[in-house]
Every structure is written in structure tokens, then in C-alpha cells.
Image (cartoon, helix red, strand yellow):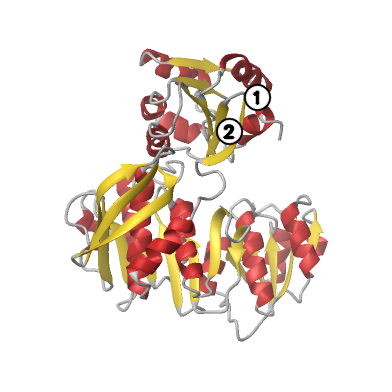
């Protein structure tokens, strides 16, 4: 496999350079003196930013873009073998890496690579950890799966040995990584278009844990079922966090303010530390505990870390306040799995409102079919539900499932649920039915946020 060496900058070509992760990795390598070029299907704010820095970007993926002076090519999972650039790269014998393999190779060039994994909560926890490292002046390099407000984007190039990244289990991509500190937030069924079942997913997380070296640390939620199957016999140190039981880092006396943000007492090493969050929900208490555990591992004093954590106000599309109109508060959230939906809607219980409206856009036919009953149960926590069409993403087979199918399941549970095939129809319905004091949350991993933004006139 091709090895990325910061001491030997080379020419790296990115096929699909405009993606949020690919563009960030390209920028990191460019900052280290690498010659970077790449292509994408169309121009975007991300490609414009890369071009402004001096990176060569081709629009349209053509065989002629590939030249023999390229030392290594990087692909996203969206690139198929019949792609003309892929064909040219293979014909010329140019070494190649997947995006995950590149990220893993880059991690080898940092003294303290930190990988944050889990079925849910990766982006928020990665951002919390980033807030602490930035506050402690540790000058980290950051690669985040969402827009993190403190850095105005998803990438930050630091000058120290700290490297922080999300670690996604989909297609086992995180098994290409080389972390020294790893976090596992939770392990649940998801991505069943790739994994066979929960046992297959757990096996993947076990392999991720085994990547940690003997002088490394695994930080893991103590509520994960059969925890010892993940942790037993690991070479690294294991630190636990959790809301119950005998975790190394746990929370007591949890209370909520008028916007659903929690305050609690963290107990660790027989000592207590008061923590006050500016993000809502019990799930963020767990994310905060994981972040505090990592702070302890790298030597940031608890009182300082708690202060830095209090500064954190969230990332884009994670219970993000979008605005208000006619007394209706509009929130947007990325939740697209039943557990995430449950956590977000429970967080709304502590947020002032009369009626809680949830506009949900299911994400992929595979996930909708696999968790149909669970989606219905989770969404029933809202007072009224409005469904958009399923966001297909990478899928083409409907599997005989639709938003109408989900609507029927929700109605069976005795909950008001409406379905409209277009965003315009949803917007008109909401404008006619939401009243002063209501809370409207748009939810899903697709483009459902456009509904709230349109209502607000953005």
C-alpha cells in the first residue's frame, strides 16, 4: 500500500475532491507541501476554496486529467470502476488509496491521532473534543463530519502532534485507521445495506478497538451490551463512561434549563466536577462525559476542560436553531436513525413549546425498511408528524417501501401523521397549521432542512 510521508511531499490526485471530507484531506496535505490536484463533477464553494489556495481542480472526470506525474490517486466510495479517471489510473499503474486508507496513512504522521467512533454522536463529540483541545492551546489538526462553528468549517490545520477525526464504521472504513486514542460512543444496528446484522457490526467495532496500541487508550460507553466482548484482552488501557453503573466517568444530579441544556456533576477518580452544557438532551451528557474522559487521558485538568466544554454551542444540523416566524421556533437536526430521533425528540421535552411538529425525511430505503416499526415508535414522541419522500442517497431499489408505509405505521400508534410528496406542499401545510408557541423541527440526513429555511425566508 502507498505510504503518505509528510517528510516526502508528493503529487496526490483526488477523484471527487469536492466532497466535504476529501476537500479537507486535500487541504491538510497541501499545507504540508504536497502538490494537490483533483476533479469533481461540478463547481462548489468547497472547490472554489481549494482553487483559491492554488490547488488545481478539474470539472468533469476525464481520462485526460490523469497524468503520469501523479504519485498516488485517492478515491471516494462513489467512484465506480467504469469511471474514466479510475480506468486511466489503473492503466497507468498509478498507486491508489481509498479515502479511509488515506486518512489512516495521514494519522501515522501525528504523535496523538484520536479517532471518535459510534453509531451516533460522532460529529458532536468530535466537536466537543475539538473545543477542549483548542481551549487548551494544543493546536490540533481537526477533521470533522459537519460544520463546526468555532473553526467555520470542517477542517483545521494545526501545528502539533494532535490529530482528531471521526471514525465511521460504514464499509469498515475505520479499520484502515491508526489511532492512539479511540472512543466508542455506542454500537447499534445501522448500515444494514453493508453489515449483515448487529453481530457483524459488533465484530467490526471489536477490530477497531484492537487497532489501539499497548500505550494507547480506548474510551467506551459502559452501557454497550456485552461490553467485555469488545474490551476483553485488548492491549490498550480501557476507560469507561456512562450515565449509570460503575463507569470511570459518570454523571449525577442532571438538571435542565429552559432550553433543555443539561447541567450535572461529573464523578471521576473519586472527585466531582460541575459541568454545564449549551447543547440540549441527555445524549449530550454522555457525549460530554466521553470528551471529559479524553481530556483526562491527554492531561487537561477537569476544571479547565469543563470550562472549555461550556463554550460549545453545537454544530450545524445538530439541534440547530434556525430562527422563528410568527412565534413558531424552527430547529433542524440530522437525526436519521430511530435512536437519534428518540434522543432529539426527548430533548425537545425540556424546550418550551405548545405543540411539537416533526417534519421527517427518511434516509435510504434499506434503513427505512429495516427499522420501520422503530421509526414509527420514535417519531410518535412528537405531537404531530409530517413525512417527506424517502431520500434515496446511493440507493435505486425502493424495496417496496415508501413514506406512505411509514405513515401507516405511525397512524396505527394513534399519532397524527401527514405525508406530502413535495416540499412546497409541506411548507404550505405548516404555514397554515403551525401557531404561535409551536416548535417545528425538520429532521433527516438529506435536504429536509430546506423546508425550515424556506419558511423562514432564508
In front here: 13 or 340? Answer: 340
Query: Which secondary structure lies at badge 1?
Result: helix
Number of numbered tags placed on the structure image = 2
Q: Residue 423 shows which numbered tag?
A: 1
Q: Residue 391 shows which numbered tag?
A: 2
Q: Position of residue 362 (x, y in %)?
A: 51, 31
Q: Assess disc 2: are there few (<14), some (14-19) or many (≥20) residues with their C-alpha within 10 Å of its C-alpha.
A: some
Query: Which secondary structure lies at badge 2?
Result: loop
Whether residue 55 sits left or right of residue 262 in the image: it is: right
Q: Residue at x 77, y 55 (%)?
A: 61
Q: Is residue 187 above or below residue 7?
A: above
Q: Position of residue 65 (x, y in %)?
A: 80, 63
Whether residue 189 sits left or right of residue 139 in the image: it is: left
Q: Is residue 419 visible?
A: yes
Q: Position of residue 401 (x, y in %)?
A: 49, 24
Q: Is residue 56 visible?
A: no
Q: Residue at x 21, y 58 (%)?
A: 247
- Residue positioned most to the right: 64
Q: Is residue 363 above or below residue 29?
A: above
Look at the image and tell me in which quarter the C terminus lies: top right
Q: Position of residue 425 (x, y in %)?
A: 65, 18
N-term-proximal mark, 1 vs 2: 2
In front here: 345 or 108? Answer: 345
- Residue positioned most to the bottom: 7
Whether residue 193 sits left or right of residue 430 in the image: it is: left
Q: How far apart, in angstroms, are the residues tagged by discs 1 and 2?
A: 12 Å
Amino acid at each position: 500500500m502507498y505510504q503518505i510521508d509528510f517528510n516526502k511531499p508528493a503529487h496526490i490526485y483526488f477523484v471527487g475532491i469536492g466532497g466535504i471530507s476529501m476537500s479537507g484531506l486535500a487541504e491538510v496535505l497541501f499545507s504540508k507541501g504536497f502538490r494537490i490536484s483533483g476533479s469533481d463533477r461540478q463547481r462548489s464553494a468547497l472547490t472554489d476554496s481549494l482553487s483559491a489556495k492554488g490547488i488545481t481542480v478539474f470539472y468533469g472526470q476525464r481520462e485526460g486529467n490523469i497524468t503520469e506525474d501523479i504519485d498516488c490517486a485517492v478515491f471516494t466510495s462513489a467512484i465506480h470502476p467504469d469511471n474514466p479517471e479510475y480506468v486511466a489510473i489503473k492503466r497507468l499503474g498509478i498507486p491508489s488509496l481509498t479515502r479511509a486508507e488515506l486518512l489512516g496513512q495521514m494519522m501515522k504522521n501525528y504523535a496523538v491521532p484520536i479517532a471518535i467512533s459510534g453509531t451516533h454522536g460522532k460529529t458532536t463529540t468530535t466537536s466537543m473534543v475539538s473545543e477542549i483541545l483548542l481551549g487548551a492551546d494544543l493546536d490540533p489538526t481537526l477533521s470533522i463530519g459537519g460544520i463546526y462553528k468555532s473553526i467555520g468549517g470542517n477542517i483545521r490545520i494545526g501545528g502539533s502532534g494532535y490529530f482528531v477525526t471521526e471514525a465511521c464504521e460504514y464499509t469498515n472504513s475505520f479499520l484502515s485507521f491508526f489511532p492512539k486514542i479511540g472512543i466508542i460512543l455506542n454500537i447499534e444496528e445501522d448500515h444494514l445495506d453493508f453489515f449483515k446484522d448487529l453481530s457483524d457490526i459488533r465484530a467490526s467495532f471489536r477490530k477497531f478497538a484492537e487497532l489501539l496500541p499497548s500505550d494507547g487508550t480506548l474510551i467506551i460507553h459502559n452501557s454497550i451490551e456485552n461490553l467485555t466482548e469488545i474490551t476483553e484482552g485488548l492491549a490498550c488501557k480501557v476507560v469507561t463512561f456512562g450515565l449509570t453503573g460503575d463507569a470511570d466517568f459518570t454523571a449525577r444530579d442532571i438538571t435542565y434549563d429552559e432550553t433543555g441544556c443539561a447541567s450535572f456533576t461529573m464523578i471521576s477518580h473519586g472527585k466531582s466536577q460541575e459541568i454545564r452544557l449549551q447543547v440540549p438532551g441527555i445524549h449530550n451528557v454522555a457525549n460530554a462525559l466521553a470528551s471529559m474522559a479524553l481530556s483526562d487521558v491527554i492531561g487537561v485538568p477537569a476544571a479547565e476542560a469543563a470550562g472549555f466544554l461550556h463554550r460549545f454551542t453545537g454544530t450545524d444540523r445538530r439541534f440547530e436553531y434556525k430562527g422563528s416566524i410568527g412565534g413558531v421556533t424552527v430547529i433542524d437536526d440530522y437525526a436519521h436513525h430511530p435512536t437519534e430521533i428518540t434522543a432529539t425528540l426527548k430533548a425537545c421535552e425540556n424546550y418550551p413549546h405548545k405543540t411539537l411538529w416533526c417534519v421527517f425525511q427518511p434516509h435510504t430505503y434499506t434503513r427505512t425498511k429495516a427499522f420501520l416499526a422503530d421509526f414509527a415508535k420514535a417519531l410518535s414522541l412528537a405531537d404531530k408528524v409530517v413525512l417527506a419522500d424517502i431520500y434515496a442517497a446511493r440507493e435505486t431499489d425502493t424495496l417496496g417501501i415508501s413514506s406512505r408505509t411509514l405513515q401507516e405505521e405511525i397512524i396505527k400508534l394513534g399519532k397524527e401523521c401527514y405525508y406530502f410528496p413535495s416540499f412546497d406542499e409541506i411548507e404550505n401545510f405548516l404555514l397554515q397549521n403551525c401557531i404561535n408557541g409551536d416548535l417545528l423541527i425538520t429532521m433527516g440526513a438529506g435536504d429536509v432542512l430546506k423546508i425550515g429555511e424556506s419558511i423562514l425566508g432564508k
